């Protein structure tokens, strides 16, 4: 990728942006045509096979975040999101972090979890003994239920049992849960895992004398974690009247608040998910799964807490880390069908699933840094006002160059609202 072609990307017109992507070697001529001719929409003949009662497409703006350096490799990050400022914030954060060496990531083995949950198990201890004794056979039967994943180098790898204790106060009996850890290779693996769970349930019933109530993947992907770290020298944080050390300390304190207070933690984590979701959506992955898993992970200490941590190292640098369960895939589902997802994959330079995890968790950390840095200094409204003015101008009916003109006047006006935007537009016409 020739990043010199992407300088001041945000200042370019749509056509210039597309041709810069082409000249930088990020997309082909054919893909550039898709973008200029609005060909990213899903064809109705495809859409109607993806969901039921299909009546049309609902589109989101697709943009790219610039300046990301992740594990020493530059990458342009496609993001599908309706919220203004998110892409600008990610690019801004990535620029500061990139100038300090970028993001370093670590990704665990990618094991998905499948659950068979049993009820009516009379002798739980005995059932656990039988399951553990039959572990190899259970794994073999799971793999026989989905032989193609074994051929691709994956398959069921290990097993674990969990007991959900009876709670007389809640009126719940005990349940026995069997977890299988499954290597789904490049797939997110929901279908693979569900097929395996349904495949082994009768044998597990036989072994335990219980009845299988649920046979399904867990979206709490604790065996598929990705961590990003960044280290920012304090002098790079200086802004306005705040010294770099001030900004560093205020970011650390804000993270402490989000660690201690669930009300703040939810908003803090929402900022992280602004970035993560936008890339998950662009890449054609299941963002509900990533959302649900991430929030459960935030509550793993039995209190909902900040997902990221910020501290100062011995040199006085600001160090941020973020770990997320990221069960994403690069094949399957809509990934190879949706034209937007195919293009996103190309922009991301054909990542494998581990690289995609590294990118996602880095974008989450960048987004968190940008949001918290703004909150503890100028506040976030300052940065939002320009975009808010532009969307008011568009709502008032401004077109093309009128949008910028009306927005500029709105920014100077004492009241930034739709009526004022309409008045400015009328004066222009
Ligand atoms: C807005 O979409 C996200 C923020 O509220 C995140 C945060 O408060 O950390 C700015």
Image: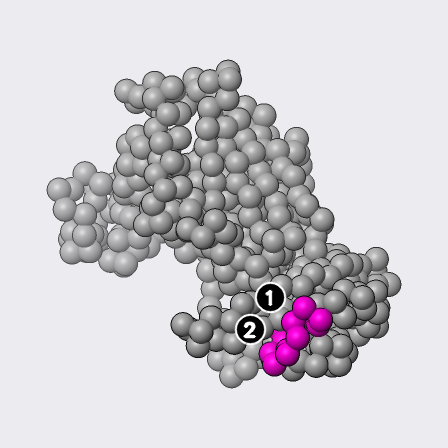
Disc 2 CB within 8 Å of nearest ligand 1 atom: no
**Residue at point 35% right, 35% down?**
254
Q: In front: 272, or 84?
A: 272
Q: Would residue 38 appear left or right of 126 to someone viewing this image?
A: left
Task: Classify mark 1: residues with Cα within 10 Å, few (<14), some (14-19) or many (20+).
Answer: some
Q: Is residue 337 magenta?
A: no
Q: In front: 237, or 417?
A: 237
Residue 412 in which image quadrant: top left
Residue stretch rendered in magenta on the structure: 116-127
**Residue at point 78% right, 59% down?**
157
Which x, y percent locates residue 299? 46, 52
Residue 333 in which image quadrant: bottom right
The residue identified by callout 1 is 163
Can residue 184 be seen here?
Answer: no
Which x, y percent locates residue 394? 30, 55
394 shown above or below 259 = below
The residue identified by callout 2 is 174
387 shown above or below 213 = above
Task: Classify mark 2: residues with Cα within 10 Å, few (<14), some (14-19) or many (20+).
Answer: some
Which is more N-terminal, label 1 or label 2? 1
Q: Is residue 118 magenta?
A: yes
Mark 2 and mark 1 in contact? Answer it, CB < 8 Å: yes
Whole-angstrom CA distance, mark 2 to mark 1, is 7 Å
Q: In front: 124, or 238?
A: 124
**Residue at point 59% right, 41% down?**
227
**Residue at point 76% right, 64% down?**
132
In the rendered image, the residue lying farthest to the right is: 151
Which x, y percent locates residue 196? 74, 72
In the rendered image, the residue lying farthest to the left is: 414
Quarter of the image for the N terminus: give it.
top right
SS at mark 2? loop
SS at mark 1? strand
């Amino acid at each position: 990728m020739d990043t010199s072609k992407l300088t001041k990307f945000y200042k370019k017109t749509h056509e210039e942006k597309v041709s810069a992507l082409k000249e930088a070697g990020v997309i082909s001529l054919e893909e550039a045509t898709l973008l200029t001719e609005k060909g990213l929409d899903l064809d109705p003949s495809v859409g109607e096979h993806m969901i039921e009662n299909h009546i049309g497409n609902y589109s989101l703006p697709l943009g790219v975040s610039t300046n990301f350096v992740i594990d020493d490799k530059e990458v342009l990050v496609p993001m599908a999101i309706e919220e203004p400022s998110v892409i600008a914030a990610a690019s801004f954060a990535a620029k500061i972090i990139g100038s300090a060496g970028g993001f370093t990531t670590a990704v665990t083995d990618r094991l998905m979890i499948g659950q068979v949950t049993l009820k009516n198990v009379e002798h739980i201890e005995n059932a656990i003994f039988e399951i553990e004794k039959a572990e190899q056979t259970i794994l073999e039967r799971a793999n026989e239920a989905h032989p193609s994943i074994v051929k691709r180098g994956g398959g069921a790898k290990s097993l674990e049992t969990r007991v959900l204790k009876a709670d007389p106060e809640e009126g719940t009996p005990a349940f026995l849960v069997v977890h299988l850890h499954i290597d789904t290779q490049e797939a997110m693996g929901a279908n693979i895992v569900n097929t395996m769970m349904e495949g082994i349930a009768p044998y597990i019933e036989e072994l335990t004398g219980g009845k299988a109530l649920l046979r399904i993947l867990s979206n709490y992907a604790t065996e598929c974690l990705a961590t990003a770290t960044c280290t920012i020298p304090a002098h790079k944080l200086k802004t306005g009247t705040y010294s770099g050390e001030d900004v560093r300390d205020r970011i650390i304190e804000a993270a402490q608040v989000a660690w201690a207070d669930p009300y703040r933690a939810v908003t803090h984590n929402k900022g992280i998910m602004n970035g993560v979701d936008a890339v998950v959506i662009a890449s054609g992955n299941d963002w509900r799964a990533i959302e649900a898993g991430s929030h459960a992970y935030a509550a793993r200490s039995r209190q909902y807490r900040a997902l990221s941590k910020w501290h100062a190292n011995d040199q006085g640098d600001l160090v941020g880390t973020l770990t997320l369960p990221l069960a994403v895939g690069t094949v399957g589902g809509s990934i190879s069908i949706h034209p937007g997802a195919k293009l996103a994959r190309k922009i991301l330079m054909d990542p494998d699933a581990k690289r995609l995890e590294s990118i996602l968790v880095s974008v989450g950390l960048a987004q968190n840094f940008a949001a918290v840095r703004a909150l503890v200094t100028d506040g976030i409204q300052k940065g939002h006002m320009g975009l808010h003015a532009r969307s008011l101008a568009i709502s008032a009916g401004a077109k093309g160059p009128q949008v910028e003109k009306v927005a500029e006047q709105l920014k100077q006006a004492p009241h930034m609202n739709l009526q004022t935007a309409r008045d400015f537009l009328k004066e222009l016409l």
